[in-house]
Image: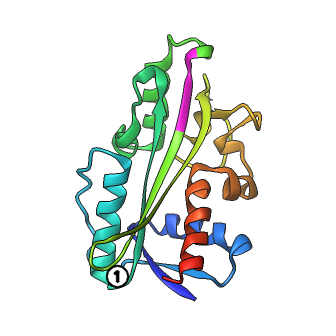
Amino acid sequence: MIKIALGTSNPHKLEEINAMLKDIHPDSVEFVLVQGVFDPVENGTTFEENSYIKAAEAAKIMGIPALADDTGLCVDALDGRPGLHSARYAPDQQSKISKLLGEMQNVPLEKRNAHFVCTMTLVAPDGTIMHRETGRIDGFIDTKPSGEHGFGYDPLFFIPDLNKTMADMTMEEKNTLSHRARALLPMVEWIKKTQV
């Protein structure tokens, strides 16, 4: 079993990632939370830079390779916003949804294209980048929220191929089709192949 530190202080993210792996890669890689003070300054200007900052800090603290992701919602009509600032766009989920709907209220349906992106970076304890993967899923911003699952912008993100929002997706769908899954699954394949 390969042990990798996960560059996050969010236990929910650890659960989600380990759940994704359970069916697809059982007993190959175990992700663990960082022990101790983990408070990296995410001052990068790209998803790649921010994922590196978090992973490098986690690897340094734990003394083992660490993986971190940076994820965001990019809306074409808003010039890519909220993008890098998706987590800090508004104080809570309801505010984020309200703010996004407010900014999109005069945008016609055919111009509401958006995508979720997730960039994952694996970093060695000495700060070297070992591997990077980016996952993406395309859709558009719906005019009202729908769905009970997920968090953040999921209830507004409609995926035409599935005819549902991200918050309507089953856990099985999310574990193979989401932007995070599309970055994580090839990352784990790489980790298994190279036996880091």
Q: Main secondary structure of the magenta part?
A: strand
Write the residue at 39% across / 46% down.
87
- Side of 121 where 172 appears, left or right: right
From the top left corner, tell me how far across and down residue 17 is, in percent: 57, 67
Q: x%, y% of residue 122?
A: 42, 68
For the point 34% across and 82% down, the residue is 35
Magenta stretch in the rendered image: 111-115
Could one spot residue 150 in this view of the protein?
no
Determine whether 87 is above or below 51 in the image: above
In this rendering, would 25 be left or right of 79?
right
Residue at horizontal 31 percent and vertical 53 percent from the top: 49
Whether residue 85 is visible here, answered yes or no, is yes
Provide the secondary structure element on which disc 1 rests. loop
Magenta span has 70?
Answer: no
Against 160, is 64 above or below?
below
Question: Between residues 20 and 127, which one lies in front from this camera angle?
Answer: 127
Q: Nearer the viewer, residue 141 or 98?
A: 141
Q: How crowded is the residue under tag 1: few (<14 C-alpha within 10 Å), some, or many (20+)?
A: few
For residue 186, side relative to residue 177 (left or right): left
Residue annotated with mark 1 = 35
Q: Amino acid at mark 1?
A: Gln
112 inside magenta stretch: yes
> 149 or 130, which is in the foreground?
130
